[in-house]
Amino acid sequence: MRITLDRNWKLIYEDGSVKNDICLPHEFSISEKSYPNPIFSSGVYERVLTELKGLEGKKIVLRFHGVDYASQITVNGKQVFNHENGYDLFEIDVTNFLNFDGQDLLQIHVSDVDVSSNPSIVMGKQDWYGNASGILQQVELWVVDEVFIKSARFTTMKDLRTIRCDIRFSDGKEHPFRLIILDPAGEKIFEVQQSKTSFTFLVDEPKPWSIDSPSLYTAVIDFDWNGCKDQFSCKFGIRTISVEADKILLNNEPVYIFGALDQNFYPITHYALPKRNELLSELLKAKEMGLNLLRFHVKIPDDLYLDLADELGLLVWIDLPYARQLDEKSKAYLEKLLENLLERHANHPSFVILSLINESWGVDLSKEEERKWLKDFYIKAKSIDPTRLYVDNSACCGNLHVCSDIDDYHFYHSFPYHNNLWKQKVEGFATGEFKSFSVPKQRLPKLISEFGVWGLSDQRDWLGNWMNFPVTVMGMKFDGSSPQDAVSLACRFHNLEDFFYQSQLHQFLGLKYQIEQIRLKEQISGYVITEFSDIAWEANGLLDYNRMPKSFYSKMRFLNNPILPIIRDHRSVLKATERYFGHLCMANSSPMNLEVKIVVRTDIKILKETNLILKRWSLTDVMEINESLDEETQNLYIEVFNDGRLLCRNFYPVAVLQPKPVSDEIVWVEDEAFQDDELICVSEKYKVHGFLELSGDWISNITVFNTKRNVNIAAFLWALGDVASEYLLLRKDAAQLSSNTSLISRIAGWGYAFASLLYVKESNGRRKIYTTLKDCELSRLLIGSILL
């Protein structure tokens, strides 16, 4: 009998206060006062084990899936076990401490440390978004005989028919048992009496687990030997994952990765997962947006998370948690955690990739001994479980791979201001000109495994108190940096409804541009967007912190589509006398050759149609678009049909403008030598809070237009990448910018700084225009259309 102890707990805090009816998983509360550390550094969880009444003669094993950080387990007042570290599953035999009278008292004393003062502790991102403490994952009670089934593992061979079965008994010996396999419909398809704990069997007409068809089989093991009985059941999928040259193969077929980083923090439960239905709703949103992978970031996922991913057909990439400074003790823990994780989650077909280190956090890869340790760590992982892919170090900012199954890298560049840098990085990464390995490597699948931009959500919808929590990075708090502080400034700057709308428009167009540049490179096998949901102040989620959709939610499925039409070098702003010119390409990142009809149209009329056969795994130049567009045109659409069914759609914002003469004086501000009694000019390298550059490559810039004209601000925003310089205008007296005077504003994050690209001064009925845009025809066209 295996029981989950999720209800009927009591928590006694260190100050003596008591909270009843606790459900697991559970975490001590975090408040503004205690952030990033929990307000209670210790407490005692207790529960009466009424389930054990009258079960004398049974062996009783407690299994803890995750307790952070230090735990002391006592039964009936007697200390049983002490444990440190918050991520590994551990178990204890408590049989000899029990009375079996229905009154056995289980107590878990949980205490934590200040993670900011203990850099060698494996903590994950608890020093960024709040320290976690409590029983963060489930607790199981196993009521078994002296010998019982410890685990069962089912591994798929390359032929997708042969399954290897590994049974482990508690005494480490071989015993007779019966194995029954049920197919995804629940029908018995295989049965065998066996005494070998490792053997193979064949599945006739197998139904492989895949993204589109997540078929799950059930194994039931019956054990009856020498007075000991047990029944153990688990689910598994028939699935292989491998690499071949520059492709990732799922079930021996290439798969393109449409992923998002999932840091898995929640506004109320923080480190603990929400209830099943809430998590199911969240993961279904990933599927709805066209995602096929979530990268579970620097944590170990709960069983529930992987259970749902298995059921839905979502690939999962797990990152091991990190310490800021790995020492010998924390390295040893990571190696132990690797073994623990690979055993615990062995049967989940969704779990396909594991990162050992993220961005070299905790290790100095400039040192030979550290590179050797990481290489040995990778070799150890492959030897334990060769059926998964391993990334040694998801590289970023100059740190490199040592030994990996995947060539991945993290790039962050702001849209639209650093579009050229993004394009160059993607090109260099695709061709191999950009160095990502410390030594030359054979062809591997290339993934851009982190990238993204910000889009602020409406703080009125937020749960909990996270609006009041400041930016916290590596234990450092930046006063005055909470979203609420920033919004209090933003509401004096601009209408908040429009502020949030324009912010999310900026995020969508940025993701669109960056994804399209990736898809134009056949050498790249996928990407992972940063990130799936917002976290506290970090607003680059596809969903907000409550896991509710942002305004562009329904459009993401067009970008995350194996078939994507792309216009290279789209020009979004044209003079009415100009023709639109662009090259249309088709990315087919699917295993199918497709006969398609392609329609190019505006909001008003069809411009072109053509029929084409798209080859599998190809990038095809389709046609030149050379058209005269009506002034009413606001979007250019490309729609792709197969047998009359819409396969995919993409669209591009367009503004066709009549040049408007500007009678006001324009001051073109070109460098920091600019002199003015009200304004100063700074480079985008100017820092806020001592660490945050206005460049927006990490905490992104939000661009806000203030214009009442009937203009397509999406088209204007897209065009800014061609005319914006590296310079910004700030108020000299540090006073708040006004959107009445700043008609194009560049705002750092939530509003950590407000800068202007187009500033208007009025004096004695005359206007003077100050701008850091480049002095060119396109800038004049934009300025003439924006000025009121």
Image (cartoon, rainbow, N blue to C red):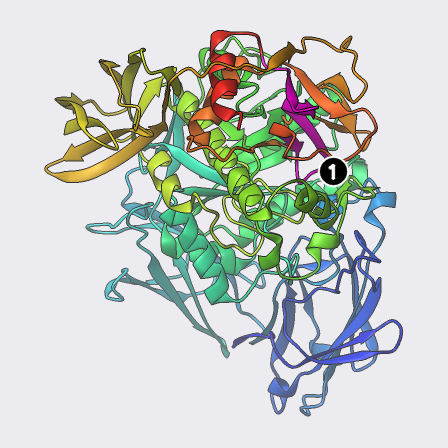
Query: In the image, is 632 to the left or to the right of 751?
Result: left
Count the marks. Answer: 1
- In which quarter of the view is residue 20 placed? bottom right
Residue visible at 82% across and 70% down? 43
Residue where numbered disc 1 is placed: 331
Choose between 266 and 318: the one closer to the eye.
266
Residue 695 in the image: state x and y as whole percent: 66, 23
Residue 577, picture quadrant: top left
Q: Is residue 7 above or below residue 550?
A: below
Residue situated furthest front in the rendering: 764
For the residue pair 605 and 383, the one nearer the viewer reads as 605
**Residue plotted at (28% across, 60% down):** 184
Disc 1 crowd, CA 10 A, few/some/many (<14, 14-19, 20+): many
Judged from the image, the secondary structure of the residue bearing numbered disc 1 is helix
Q: Is residue 362 visible?
A: yes
Residue 280 image position (x, y, % from top left)? 44, 60
660 left or right, relative to 24: left
Q: Inspect the magenta stretch and tell me whether residue 635 lies in it.
A: no
Q: Position of residue 705 (x, y in %)?
A: 55, 32
Does residue 78 appear left or right of residue 530 in this picture?
A: right
User: Is 80 positioned to the left or the right of 124 in the image?
Assistant: right
Q: Relative to 425, is 65 above or below?
A: below
628 relative to 530, above or below: above
Residue segment shown in magenta? 746-773
> Can the viewer see residue 168?
no
- Residue at image position (68%, 35%) is 738
Predominant SS along the magenta part: strand
In x, y percent, where is residue 155? 40, 47
* Viewer-proximal residue among 424 and 169: 424
Residue 286 position (above or below residue 98)? above
Amino acid type, label 1:
Lys
